[in-house]
Image (cartoon, helix red, strand yellow):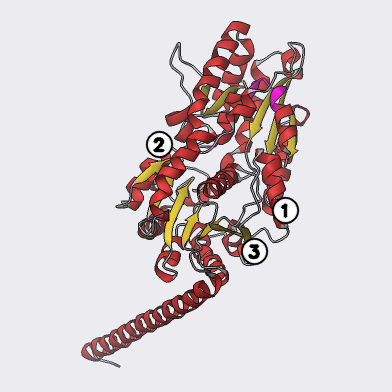
Amino acid sequence: MLSLEECLSLLYLASQVTLAFSIGGLLLLTVILGLGFIILKFIAGRRKRRNGHEGELTVGFFHPYCNAGGGGERVLWRAVRCVQIRYPAASIVVYTGDTEAAPDQILNKARDRFDMNISSKNLEFVYLHKRRYVEAVRYPYFSILGQSIGSLVLGVEALMNTVPDIYFDTMGYAFTLPLFKYVCGSKVGCYVHYPTISTDMLDAVQSRRLAFNNKKRISRNPLATFIKLRYYRVFAWMYGRCGRAADSVMVNSSWTEDHINSLWKTTSSVHKVFPPCDVSHFAQIVPSRDVSDINKILSLGQFRPEKDHPLQIKAMYELRQIISDKEWEKTKLVIIGGCRGEEDERLVKDLRDLCKYLSVEDNVEFRVNLGFPELLSELGSGLIGIHTMWNEHFGIGIVEMMAAGLLTIAHRSGGPLMDIIIEETGSRNGFLASTPQEYAAQIAYVLSMTKEGKEGVQERARSSVNLFSSQKFDSGWTRATDSLFKK
């Protein structure tokens, strides 16, 4: 039988061995990371000398889903177009994971979806074959950390192919910013659509509130909440450190600006550059609906969980309870959106199943991956626009619907609340809601409005969206990035 002193000695010895292994492990990890940094920097330098030509400027855009056809892609192609016009001699590289699409197919889709002609001159696509590492489905747990580390894998693949003089992340992969700045020596800029983590997400976990990023099994478990909160705080610190590597920071709304300033605490100026909304084409839409036609409620947005399409379907269920059968027969929700892959396609199937479960399938229609002409046709026949994402960073689809003359109902949060929708009497240009019941009530109210009342809201909405035009984006992008192009 060991004495107390012997037990304490053994425990002390075990602690010293554990400490030695821990220190040794940390030292080994530091050496490995240091060697990796040196090797990558050496390879990047050789790659830059091999690819570069005397006096040639290379501008890289990191956008693994450049062919998705959403609002983020509109920003990408408008930014590419800005660089092409202002610096015609610059060589532009787009890093994309859309390996199944040829360059001409990608540019044709940009033209068809956004009515935007991008010159193929001095434009090259670098295809990334490890995009699977940034897909959320790969990380059922710790997804934002997994995707961020995955973006480093994708970033290394990108720099192993082409090292740019100026690097732009236009999709929100902040972890790639220090990679290109310190390994490649590139000047670094970013356009932030939505912070990877926000103080709202931290608050949701801390208050144990149910949200799309805080599932029931977490919110109801104190230990799980404690662990997740610590994880979020560590990630927020890492995210802020990476963001501070940017030489130029652009954000798409007041809401995003507040969060980036809070999380990044960057010394660089944060420029609020509203996304380019091609309001001219939408404002020219001639309404094609008649008073006897179907009352179309249109939804625009990619099929992603955070867009909260189920809320729209639940709102239709609630609407059925408060309007007459005759009016219900004339009312239809048309959900228009883009699918990026199998995960999004599964979401559409789940939404169809939800429609059947709530017995509203006859009044809900899905239009997936519409071309630009078809989109304009749908908008011309619509009456109401609906958007349901909580804390939407901005909401290009909302602006497009307002410009097209739809009476638009958006979520009472984020960009729609802070930048787009005005509810004051005499200035109203749209409507806000947050629950299925509130959305249903707003839809019923719009359906009951007089013709003059509808036209007043439509006119004010169309006037207000000029603030978000493509020309405003061009001047904002140029102002925010000119310093990166100076030698």
User: Is 288 left or right of 307, judged from the image as shown?
Assistant: right
Q: Quadrant of the N terminus?
A: bottom left
Callout 2, which amino acid? Ser
Residue visible at 71% across and 43% down in the picture: 348
Say which label, 1 or 2, has the lower sequence index.
Answer: 1
Frontmost of labels 3 and 2 is 3
Frontmost of labels 1 and 2 is 1
Q: Which mark is residue 207?
A: none
Marks 1 and 2 sit apart, C-alpha to C-alpha, by 36 Å
Disc 2 marks which residue? Answer: 254
Q: Is residue 127 visible?
A: yes
Residue 403 lies, in percent from the top left, at: 59, 25
Who is closer to the viewer here, 484 or 189?
Answer: 484
Q: Which mark is residue 127?
A: 3
Disc 1 marks which residue? Answer: 104
Residue visible at 49% across and 52% down in the picture: 172
* Stretch of the chain drawn in magenta: 379-389
Callout 1, which amino acid? Asp
Q: Quadrant of the C terminus?
A: bottom left
Say which label, 1 or 3, has the lower sequence index.
Answer: 1
Marks 3 and 2 sit apart, C-alpha to C-alpha, by 34 Å
Residue visible at 72% across and 53% down in the picture: 104
Residue 224 lies, in percent from the top left, at: 44, 56
Quarter of the image where one finds residue 328: top right
